[in-house]
Each structure stands twice: as C-alpha cells, then as structure tokens.
Amino acid sequence: MNNVLDTSGLPQTPPSDNPPASSTNPLLCPRENTVAALWEQIQRVQVIYVRGTPTSGKSILARLFRAYVKTKRPGIDVHLFNWPVDIERKDGYHLLNDILKQPATDSDTWLERQNKLIIIDEAQRSYKFHNIWDEFIKTLASSNGSGPFVVLFSSFGSPAGTPVEVPIESGSAPVQFRPDQRVSIQALPYTNPNVSLYFSREEFSDAVARLCKKYRNDDGNHFIPSEELMQHIWELTNGHPGGVSAVLEILIHSKVSISQLDHYAELTRSEPETVSKRQLNNTP
C-alpha cells in the first residue's frame, strides 16, 4: 500500500534512503552537530547541567554524547550511569567509587583525575546527597579547568543557576552554575545556541527521514510527508523528540477517508485533492 500524505498538492519526493551519518541504531538521529558542540562546551566549563522534562531526549543524548567522545577522543575514559534509586549515603568520593566500581581510596582523588568524563543520567536522584554536590560538583563547577568533566542530566530542579537547595544547618553555599554551564530543552543564546535537548531543524528532518525509511523497508508503507506537513509537525512539536515520534506514528498508522478529506477541505476552503493524495485500500 502506498501512503502518501500531502498537504501541498505538489508532487512529492520520498525522504532520502541515505539520511546523514548513521548511528549504531539506524532509527536514531546521531545529532552529530549537537554532541560536537556539547563536547566543545564541556572542555571550556568543566561541568554542564542539562535539565528537561521526561521524554525530552536526555537519556538518548547522554548515550550519543558518550559514543561521540569515545569515538573522537579515545584517550578520554568515559563513564555513563543512571544515578541509583537506592544507594547508601557516603562521602562524595566513596559514592563515586561504589557506583563506578572503582578501588576504594582514603582521599578524594576524583578531583585530581584527568582525561575522564562522567555522564550522570537521572541526576535528580542525587539531589539529596549533599556531599556529592558540595564536595565534588561545586568544586569542579568553580575550578580552573582541572579534574574530570561532568555532565548531569536531570528531569527536574531549578532551571536557574542553583538547581539544588542546601540545608541551612550545613552552613555551605549552594552550587552555582553559570549560564554557559547550563543546557535546556531549547537552544538559548546566553547558554549555548548550538546545544539543546530538542531537535534542531536539521535533526528533525533526519529523524523524520529515518522513521519513514523504517516503514518503507518493514511493510512497504510509503508514508511521504510534504514540506508543508513537515513544517506543521515542526511547529506543533517544536522539535521535542518524543513529540515528533508520537505525531509521526499517529500519522503513519492513521486511516484517512475521502469523507474526512472532504470535511477537512471544507474547513480549510481547499479542494480535497490539494489537502491529501494519500492512497488507501478499501476507500469508502
């Protein structure tokens, strides 16, 4: 079955069978420009705090970033892990030793370790471990460029420079992240205009091409979104990775009848054939 959803009335060209640079998963947009910009940024600022809602692409970006650094900078020792749901409270460096299964030490050698990248997903679970933030994260965030690189991916917390509240009785100042140490769901000029959780327009087009190719190869479903429809999806989702995938899945599996197109055409004051050219079996 050929399913061509066209809202422009113009002849359509199927998305490329050769989308840009494939990752290990052929359905996964590698986001090469984003992870390259993130690597450049972490080398300047030592610690980066990435905050976004669930399904905004944090875990996938964390894995893509690990793969990029391991490929481009093999001399960097990369550790990626989810902060455990249940872990015994210990001093900051003892916690890292336990989580990363490193040999126990009597002193905080983590602050002295070079050529290491620590990527912590689900970092919001670590907020209650004040030692790790006060002794390790805060020190690195205000360092002069020595020690390991750390990227924290968190689902909640303050979007401002102080993500974690510190107990008054601790007598310690909270961690302060500068604008260039923060990444949000959208690219912002005062943080990093080249890094965000949401897709760039180029990444969005690549993600759409990969999903459409999957359905062409798997079941011959030739879903071909027009440029106009692509623009509508882009504006609707704003590049939200989960939103893009959900909208495309709905459209690819939808059943559009002539009566539905007639109704849509009436609403838009367009001719049915300019609204859609989708070919359906068993059209009423």
Image (cartoon, rainbow, N blue to C red):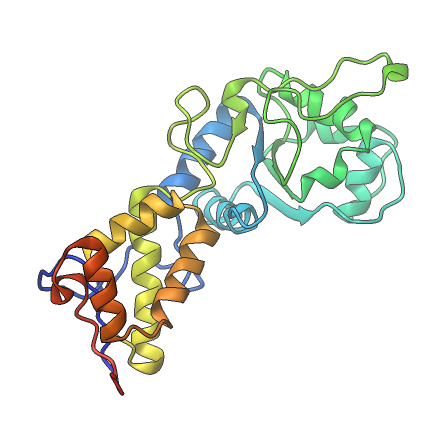
Residue at 22% in and 63% down: 15
Where does the N terminus fall, quadrant-wise?
bottom left
Q: Quadrant of residue 124?
A: top right
In front: 51, or 82?
51
* Residue 47 sits above or below residue 74 on the image: above
In front: 242, or 172?
242
Q: x, y percentage for residue 32?
A: 37, 45
Q: Is 218 left or right of 138, judged from the image as shown?
A: left
Q: Quadrant of residue 83?
A: top right
Residue at 61% in and 20% down: 161
Residue at 63% in and 17% down: 143
Q: Is 125 left or right of 279, judged from the image as shown?
A: right
| Residue 109 seen anywhere in this rendered image of the structure | yes
Where does the C terminus fall, quadrant-wise?
bottom left
Q: x, y percentage for residue 268?
A: 20, 54
Q: Is 194 left or right of 43, judged from the image as shown?
A: left
Residue at 45% in and 36% down: 196
Q: Residue furthest left?
A: 11
Q: Residue furthest bottom?
A: 282
Q: x, y percentage for residue 133?
A: 75, 27
